[in-house]
Amino acid sequence: MRADVFVGREKELTEVSALLGKTRHVTLTGTAGVGKSRLALHLVRTLENESSADVHVVDLADAPGDLVSLAETVAGAIGVRGRPGVPAPRSLVEALAPRRTLIVLDTCDRVIGAVAALVEELRAVADLRILATSRQRLGLSDEHLYPVGALPPADAVYLLTALADRRLDDMDPAELCDRLGNLPLAIELAAASPDPGTADVFTATSGTWRHSSMRAAHGWSHELCDPKERLLWARASVFSGTFDMEAVKEVCVAEGLTADEVSDTMIGLLDKSVIAGEDGQCGRRYRLPATAREFGAVWLDLLGETGEMRRRHRDHFLNLSGRAEIGWQCEQLDWYRRLVLECANVRQAIDYCYARPDERRKGLELVGNLWFLWACCGMHVPGDNLLQRGLDLERTPGPERTKALWVHAWVSIQRGDLERAERTLAECVAEDPEEHATAYVSQFQAHLAVLRGDVGAALHLIKQARERHRSAGNVFPGFLPTYTVVATAMMLSGSLQQAVSVLREGRELCASCGDRWTLIRLDLLLAQAEHLLGGTDVATASVRDSLRGARLFGDTFSLLEGLEVAAVAAEATEDDALAALLLGAADAARTGTGVPPTRSPILTSLLRMAELRLRGRLGRARFDGLTERGSATDLRSAVEHALQGTIL
């Protein structure tokens, strides 16, 4: 970061300062260009004004690598003299003993062993505090590591705009900062370029106080790595976003690196801050910062392994998608949580396939396997785009294309494009002479018939679909979701009690099969049926169960419809303020997320009647004010209002 610009880091400054008040040795670690040294220097300037201790900064970038010479370098930098004939380390200890001192040992990486030995010697000085900056730990027992991460997005954008001034008029600063990993050094290098948006931060130069380019910064890290660490760094560059150890072993284990060596090699890269680790619900995952990933990709090209690693990456995620499709039958939430983390890698694998004519069928297979992400988990837009793109590229009929067609029809229904869904299903029929997809075609044609209010056609088509799904043993996404069509058709025909019976039967079957997603849809319908039967309390409980489930899966479509059903239930109890607010929130969220309404005629009628009654009781001004307030409420908060049954 340029010496005269320092942005953010309030939290880090406070925490490191507090640590130095209670521990004797803190090491700031982090990837190249993250700003460890700038953070330390800024902290020093603060402490110099607030502390009575002597504060010294020693730059070790070019320091000698033996203990004696290093001790002499440190002594000279802080202006102390030892007694003649006394070894430099002990002489330094004696000189520091009477003082309250803070020494910043900056950039310890190249002389890590000598620095560790010197710090061990300096432990004899009671009032000495040491702040080190290094891409890897010193390895001492009482060392307190403080990882320095990239800037928060808002601070990164502020830094870029402060440095680049008016040269950002034609670009999105947030997008550029994200591409640069929000790293201060990369942002400075881009900002120093005549065109920040297209700057190559690996070769760009600036007046930065240490590294002339990100290539130089990462090159330093590269020198610290052993050959196997360099090899794994290069191979891991094929991953996008985060990745797990299973992926590393399947993709990166090849000539020069065995499965038994991967774990220790990964630890080495973690210790050197080349790779970052993070723990979450799905266990330990890893990430290569954006610029480190690009650096590794350059070396992968030099090794001549880019093609092989890309293919291995594709194969791993194609295999994972197949396992996920099978696992979704009974472990839906686990697979949703895992695949959400893999979206960047999945997209990369799909792009790899789509870019190669002989691989496009595999790309369609991968997209088709992940139908549950596109249709059930709120990812309608990216799924729609990936499906359409693949179908446009791969026109030759085949099982992968047939499956992609019915999945695309399903997503089109979710997105409200019913005409495209009809056309896609017709195309699916024309390309499927052996009728492998007939059950799904009938299922989604029945869904379309229900949305049009054609009860007879819906019941005829869904009967065909259920018979075929049952004979094939296809429980999900086949047989279980058909309960929603059957129940909706019965509600449209006025058979409310029969619809409730069907819905409760479907709920029991979902519970026994572990199908938590269809349960969300059944609960929404049950809430509507119970409401029409006068069971307002049961309806409210059902819609809240649905909202809780939809929230777990990020199911935007069900969340929006759930808000509407919750508004209907609230209006029935004359909780008019909540009902009006939920209507406004649902309408605004539909607009913001690009999910047009694909409601059944029943819900459309319920909403129309609820709104008429609300307008009558509240009056136009009060109703408009509450819906406007709802439109300013984000989806997550609106769902919480509905779950709590009150305006929080």
Image: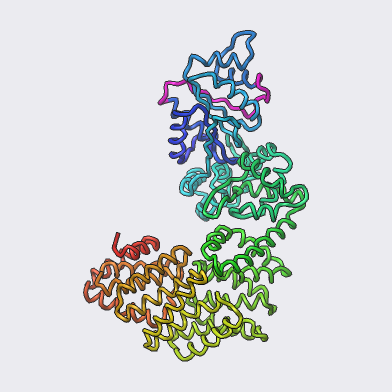
Please tell me which residue is depicted at 25% across the width and 69% down the height of the picture.
575
Q: Percent from the top left, x then y, of residue 368?
A: 61, 71
Viewer-side residue, 641 vs 3: 641
Please tell me which residue is depicted at 52% across the width and 31% down the height of the picture.
26
* Relative to 619, residue 533 above or below: below
Q: Is residue 1 left or right of residue 110?
A: left
Q: Is residue 613 left or right of residue 452?
A: left
| The N terminus - image quarter | top right
Q: Is residue 528 left or right of residue 117?
A: left
Viewer-side residue, 34 vs 472: 472
Viewer-side residue, 262 vs 230: 262
| The C terminus - image quarter | bottom left
Please tell me which residue is depicted at 53% across the width and 60% down the height of the picture.
337
Please tell me which residue is depicted at 45% across the width and 89% down the height of the picture.
454
Q: Percent from the top left, x then y, of residue 363?
A: 66, 68
Q: Percent from the top left, x then y, of residue 205?
A: 62, 41
Q: Which residues are magenta?
A: 49-69
